[in-house]
Amino acid sequence: MIQSVDVSCSSISPEAKIGKNVTIAPLVMIASGCVIGDNVTIEPGTIIYENVHIGANTHIGAQCILGERLGGYKKGSDYVNPELRIGPDSVIRAGAILYAGSSMGRGFQTGNRCVIREGSHFGDNCSFGTLSQSDGTIKVGDNCRFHNNVFIATHTTVEDNVHFYPMSCTTDSLHPPCQIGREGPTIGAGSIIGAKVLLLPRVKIGKNCVIAGASVVTKDVPDGMVAAGSPAKVLKRREEVRCHLEDRPAYDVALESSQESK
């Protein structure tokens, strides 16, 4: 059952499966092979290309593009758009572009005008901030937060409970633009990546690390360590950092939250 302002102004393929109590605003396009779960809301001007699956109770903002077609679309009539899967209880905010061939778990949230390229796979309860971009072929665990203007290069692995702060960036080529042996960094569970941090290719950040803002990380960082500088150097253990407002370790709360969400 579709509850819509004006379905006549939208284009909905008869081959799309629409759940119960779905609200579709004007000027929405839904292509064949799409599956829209119950209680989904789709705001005006959104384009949903072939084979997009949207989980129940999800809100899609205005002028989003979901299931953006890949480069092969223009090369021949036999192109089949890979599936894009968005988990239930998600919020995709206005202007977001999510490519085909990606997946997002339950409770996924975006900011406005972010771009998520093909082969990006997120676990449950992740958020991806305004104007951030995944360059594709990345793997992200559960409960990860990417703040505004973050860039995640291809072949980056992010484990559970990781926070990326604004304008941080990962890279995947040892000597760009060379494409040989591209491999992004790996960020261990519970780590915090500060604002404007640059992580070089193949670097491994251990579990529960803190990388201070504006650092350039060129070497591996062991578990539980704080690193800072350009190039970044390991300074101390995470639990040695003291809060300036209270007499306690600075990262108690972050560490407890990380453990509770496992």
Image (cartoon, rainbow, N blue to C red):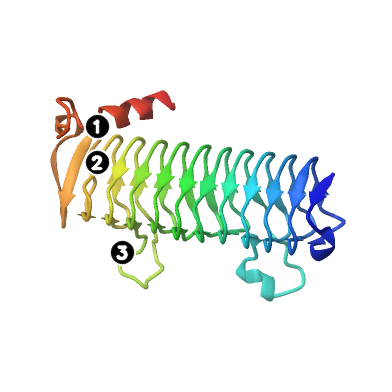
Q: Amino acid at mark 1?
A: Tyr
Q: Is residue 61 left or right of residue 30?
A: left
Q: Position of residue 44 (x, y in %)?
A: 68, 60
The residue carrying mark 1 is: 251
45 and 12: which is toward the camera: 45
Q: Element under label 1?
A: loop
Regarding mark 2 in the picture, which secondary structure is present there? strand
In this view, 163 is above or below 261: below
**Of label 2 and label 3, which has the lower sequence position?**
3
Labels 1 and 2: the sequence-earlier one: 2
Q: What crowding class fits label 2: few (fewer than 14 Cα within 10 Å), some (14-19), or many (20 or more)?
A: many
- Residue hosting label 2: 210
Q: Earlier in the sequence, mark 3 or mark 1?
A: 3
Residue at 41% x, 52% y: name it: 156
Query: Label 3 vs label 1: CA separation?
Result: 33 Å
Q: Give the CA distance from mark 2 to mark 3.
A: 24 Å
- Quadrant of the image containing the N terminus: top right
